[in-house]
Amino acid sequence: MDPRTLCFLSCCLLICVTSADFQEHGGTPEALKKKDVKAASPGAGKPSGAPGRRKPESDQSQKSLRTKTPVEPAAPSPLAPSILTQVAGRGRFQRVGDSLSLRAGESLELRCWGKVVHWRVPAYLGEEGEGRLRIRHFRQHSRLQLVNSTGADTGEYSCWACQDAACPEDQARQGKTFIFFTDPEELFIPTENYYEMVQLRSHQPVLLPCQVTNPLAQVTLHREFPPEEVPVDGTDISFDVKKGFTIHQPRASLAGSLFCLASLGGIRQISTKYMLIYINYPSSSPKPTIQASAVSVLLGENFSVTCTILSEPEIAVDFSWEYPGQKLGRPPYVSERAHAVRREGQVQQEAGSTLYVEEARAGDAGIYTCRATNLQGTGTATTHVHVTPSPRVSPAPS
């Protein structure tokens, strides 16, 4: 090979090697210098006093393995909306919502997080003792287990937790859920009674507790005689799948035998029959007023004391008396009345009782007490009657 050609190829090779090294170290000689400085000073950029040598990764991993120990599942954060969770599997927990559906026969396990935990379950379950329901308390939580579940177990399950036993329920953290144990053979929660008496009180809502075991069941309300469906408009009567039918505006026309009908997947079942008895219930206890025919009477005179109340129409009121003559063995002479009156544009009932005292004696002086009683309670009113001797009559002048 020609010496000139060999020299030219050697120069080209040197240029290529230098260019590759230049690009690898940042593209400029200054960058190459900076990278050399950083590589030579591994402690640069750390706070003063910080160690300049890192521990090997293998040492840290071994220390982590040595200190790691199994722990209980962590309790929910204090900011969590509920302290109640369901055990969905080994080591798996999920928060329960407003309601939960399980098949009858499945097991249930709930955990309530707190140091001092109290549970509330459907009433009859709480009476079973150590049967299908088991509750066990731990240091940071309490566990509820239910096995061999049935449709009758449908209901609300709740808990409240405190830091100590003295914490009242209204100040504790609470969690609750309504659990449906679906049973294709029992659309309604079973009851022991074929008929159930219900007072249809005029002054307050009335609940017909025909609860279903499946939230998907379609439920309607029916009258037994004459057979017809009772309209449910959501205002006068409403339905809640967790409670049943609520009659918000009780009236006499709803009295009689009613029942609920549930339908699901071609299955139709009727509930317990409810015998509704209408009662015109007063809105409040009586507030009687009392007045004597005379505050002061003479010996031997007749007088009376009258007790009166105003109430809603057709409200039954019972009157009773206490009077001084009872100590003398004097029997009461009483008359009662009740009639409708119009006051301030409204029709009301005025009821009254009058106690008569004939030929007043000294022992008839004292306090007269009237008591008026209705279904809401008793009201009392009193008055005082004085009995004075008759004035002496002066002899006529002769």
Image (cartoon, rainbow, N blue to C red):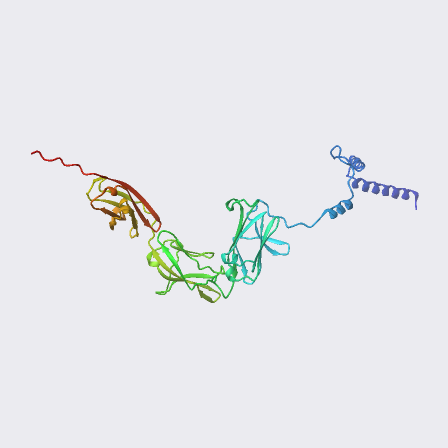
Q: Nearer the viewer, residue 111 or 77?
A: 111
109 to the left or right of 358: right
Residue 349 position (above or below residue 229): above
5 to the left or right of 101: right
Q: Nearer the viewer, residue 14 or 107?
A: 107
106 to the left or right of 61: left
Residue 96, percent from left and from top: 55, 53
Residue 358, percent from left and from top: 21, 46
Who's the residue at 30% across and 43% down the image? 381
Q: Nearer the viewer, residue 193 or 182?
A: 193
Q: Quadrant of residue 147?
A: bottom right
Residue 309 position (above or below residue 241): above
Specify the farthest residue to the top: 48
Q: Nearer the viewer, residue 356 or 74?
A: 356
Residue 204, percent from left and from top: 38, 52
Residue 7 can be seen, yes or no:
yes
Residue 56, percent from left and from top: 78, 43
Residue 345 can be seen, yes or no:
no
